[in-house]
Image (cartoon, helix red, strand yellow):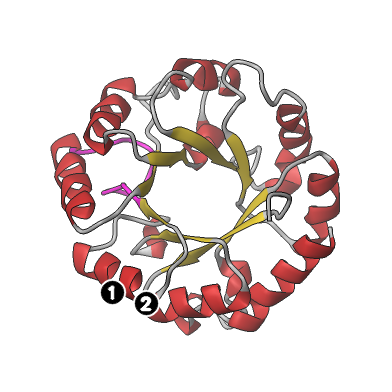
């Protein structure tokens, strides 16, 4: 199992979660309001999903569209509620107006998470300086993953950046796992796998019928098969 690539699928509800696990997902990212790029789901939704599957769940901490933190008190309260419901892994990431990491917001949330593992999401793709961001966040407890397309415009444009960052694994700021997502397609996988990248995140690709149709276990299974053959 140690060499198996990680496949993370976005789930909006328990039906999505069951279909994704059935298809071979290793982990789910839980969000609501995909029109706003994914906001924090309710505690009740988390509870229903947690009861329906037994794979790890990473819960989005985000209360507004865009990459500003917004009301950090609300974020902290939601994190506390979700922790109380049993959430153990999270997704977050905030930038200030200049495109630098909003360390005040991130550090307050990380303190509330109290050692939980978390992903810094695609805010890195909008950062003024990706390398500086990684180094500024390097010592935060629990940060084990960057969700990134390598570019704000998606994997097609970010491929060279992803390959270059994968080659720096182990350097300060580059220890977290690269989780590739954002316009990711099956035809991207050979080059990414060849670069040593071993974690992949899909949303729309798991939903051939569109976001209103839910996750399709067969679509997830196709990704699982390609990754396992990789």
Tag 1 and tag 2, C-beta contact below 8 Å: yes
Question: Which mark is on residue 48?
Answer: 1
Tell which of 23 and 165 is nearer to you. 23
Dot 2 alpha-carbon crowd within 10 angstroms: few under 14, some 14 to 19, many 20 or more: some
- With 149 as the anchor, is 119 left or right in this view? left
Residue 86 location in percent, x, y? 25, 56
| Quadrant occupied by the N terminus | bottom right
Q: Is residue 213 magenta?
A: no
Residue that carries the numbered disc 2 in the rendered image: 52
Residue 58 location in percent, x, y? 41, 53
Dot 1 alpha-carbon crowd within 10 angstroms: few under 14, some 14 to 19, many 20 or more: some
Question: Which mark is on residue 33?
Answer: none
User: Range of the magenta residues?
Assistant: 60-71
| Quadrant occupied by the C terminus | bottom right
- Helix, strand or loop at mark 2: helix
Quick one: which residue is furthest to the front in this view? 1
Q: Main secondary structure of the magenta part?
A: loop
Against 175, is 229 above or below?
below
Residue 81 location in percent, x, y? 16, 52
Q: Is residue 62 magenta?
A: yes
Estimate the spatial distance between the alpha carbons at disc 1 and disc 2, rounded to whole Å. Answer: 6 Å
Residue at x 76% of width, y 61% of height: 227
Residue 40 location in percent, x, y? 29, 55
């Amino acid at each position: 199992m140690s060499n198996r690539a990680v496949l993370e699928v976005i789930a909006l509800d328990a039906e999505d979660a069951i279909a994704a696990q059935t298809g071979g997902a290793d982990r789910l990212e839980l969000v609501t309001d995909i029109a706003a790029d994914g906001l924090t789901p309710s505690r009740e939704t988390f509870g229903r999903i947690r009861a329906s599957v037994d794979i790890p769940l990473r819960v989005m901490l985000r209360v507004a569209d865009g990459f500003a933190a917004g009301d950090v008190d609300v974020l902290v309260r939601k994190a506390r509620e979700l922790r109380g419901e049993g959430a153990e892994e999270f997704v977050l990431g905030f930038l200030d107006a200049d495109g630098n990491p909003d360390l005040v917001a991130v550090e307050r949330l990380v303190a509330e998470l109290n050692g939980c593992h978390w992903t810094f999401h695609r805010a890195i793709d909008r950062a003024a300086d990706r390398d500086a961001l990684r180094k500024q966040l390097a010592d935060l407890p629990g940060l084990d993953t960057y969700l990134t397309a390598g570019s704000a415009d998606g994997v097609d444009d970010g491929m060279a950046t992803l390959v270059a960052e994968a080659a720096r694994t182990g350097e300060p700021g580059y220890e977290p796992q690269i989780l590739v997502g954002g316009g990711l397609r099956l035809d991207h996988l050979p080059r990414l796998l060849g670069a040593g990248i071993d974690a992949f995140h899909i949303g729309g690709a798991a939903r051939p019928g569109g976001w209103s149709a839910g996750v399709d276990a067969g679509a997830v299974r196709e990704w699982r098969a390609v990754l396992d053959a990789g």
